[in-house]
Image (cartoon, rainbow, N blue to C red):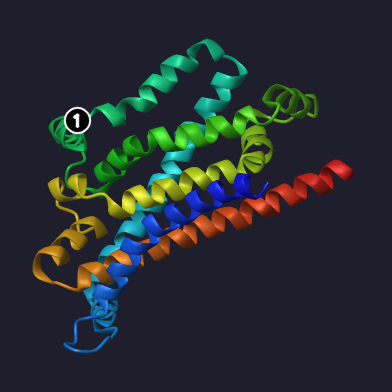
């Protein structure tokens, strides 16, 4: 019994060391801005830099817009495929996998070529950048929504809502969306992380987002990029913690509902 426990524990420890040791080294390096002593000067520099705040706030706004547009596109599409058109699921899955095949540099040049001339000119607006981010988020958002829809009885819920006189919009926003809360949060946080660190599209379209700011700091400073890496890890862990808390709350509500 002890031997059976030894190897899983050993693998967990090795994985933790493999992950935490580089992170600790990065954190330790970020504290060395003062010669001969540890300090948080690099963090103070980053957090007090107006460009950091502006780029971060701008990227957060773009991420929220991307999440909203992605949900509006993906949730009704996935819902309709599950309900009425299951034979189109392979086609939709193939389309949502295209961002893994098409490099962002190719995608952004295509967007510039199409939307830099009439009748629709979007190159000078952040809407084009949001559109590009929506395409990049397709694989993550669609699979999160698809997994959530597979976990519930979509047809029974829809028929029950229709028998009570609910419209399609009511079914989507008052039946489907609440049952997909955890899945939507998973997709939203993944989309948030993608937008926050994306570099190619923002650079080519010349928008002051967080990704180009990270690259600029990395070119001109020594210790501040390490501080930014730790801050980015912290934001990622906060998102993961929120997913866990909200998922646990959803499971507890489901268990209470089942006992009733």
- Note whether residue 57 is visible: no
Q: Position of residue 19 (x, y in %)?
A: 38, 56
In front here: 138 or 32? 32
Q: Position of residue 187 (x, y in %)?
A: 48, 43
What SS does tag 1 mark?
Answer: loop
Residue at 45% across / 15% down in the picture? 90
- Note whether residue 114 is visible: yes
Q: Position of residue 95 (x, y in %)?
A: 36, 22
Residue 169 left/right relative to 17: right
Q: Quadrant of residue 79?
A: top right
Q: Residue furthest top?
A: 87
Residue at 26% across / 49% down in the picture? 198
Q: Position of residue 193 (x, y in %)?
A: 37, 51
Residue 5 left/right relative to 256: left
Residue 18 left/right relative to 159: left
In the picture of the structure, the residue carrying the numbered disc 1 is 119
Residue at 68% across / 31% down in the picture? 152
Q: Residue furthest left?
A: 220
Residue 164 left/right relative to 222: right
């Amino acid at each position: 019994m002890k031997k059976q426990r030894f190897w899983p524990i050993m693998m967990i420890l090795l994985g933790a060391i493999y992950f935490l040791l580089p992170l600790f080294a990065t954190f330790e390096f970020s504290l060395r801005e003062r010669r001969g002593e540890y300090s948080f000067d690099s963090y103070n520099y980053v957090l007090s830099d107006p460009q950091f705040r502006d780029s971060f706030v701008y990227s957060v706004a773009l991420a929220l817009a991307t999440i909203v547009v992605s949900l509006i596109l993906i949730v009704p599409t996935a819902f309709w495929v599950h309900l009425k058109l299951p034979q189109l699921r392979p086609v939709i899955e193939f389309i949502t996998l295209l961002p893994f095949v098409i490099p962002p540099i190719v995608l952004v040049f295509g967007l510039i070529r199409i939307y830099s001339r009439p009748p629709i000119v979007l190159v000078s607006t952040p809407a084009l950048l949001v559109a590009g981010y929506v395409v990049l988020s397709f694989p993550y958002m669609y699979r999160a929504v698809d997994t959530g829809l597979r976990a519930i009885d979509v047809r029974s819920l829809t028929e029950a809502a229709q028998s009570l006189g609910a419209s399609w919009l009511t079914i989507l926003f008052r039946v489907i969306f609440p049952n997909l809360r955890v899945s939507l949060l998973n997709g939203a946080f993944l989309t948030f992380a993608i937008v926050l660190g994306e570099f190619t599209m923002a650079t080519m379209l010349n928008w002051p987002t967080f990704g180009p700011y990270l690259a600029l700091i990395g070119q001109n400073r020594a210790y501040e990029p390490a501080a930014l890496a730790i801050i980015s890890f912290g934001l990622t862990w906060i998102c993961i913690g929120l997913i866990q808390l909200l998922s646990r709350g959803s499971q507890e509500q489901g268990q209470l509902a089942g006992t009733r």
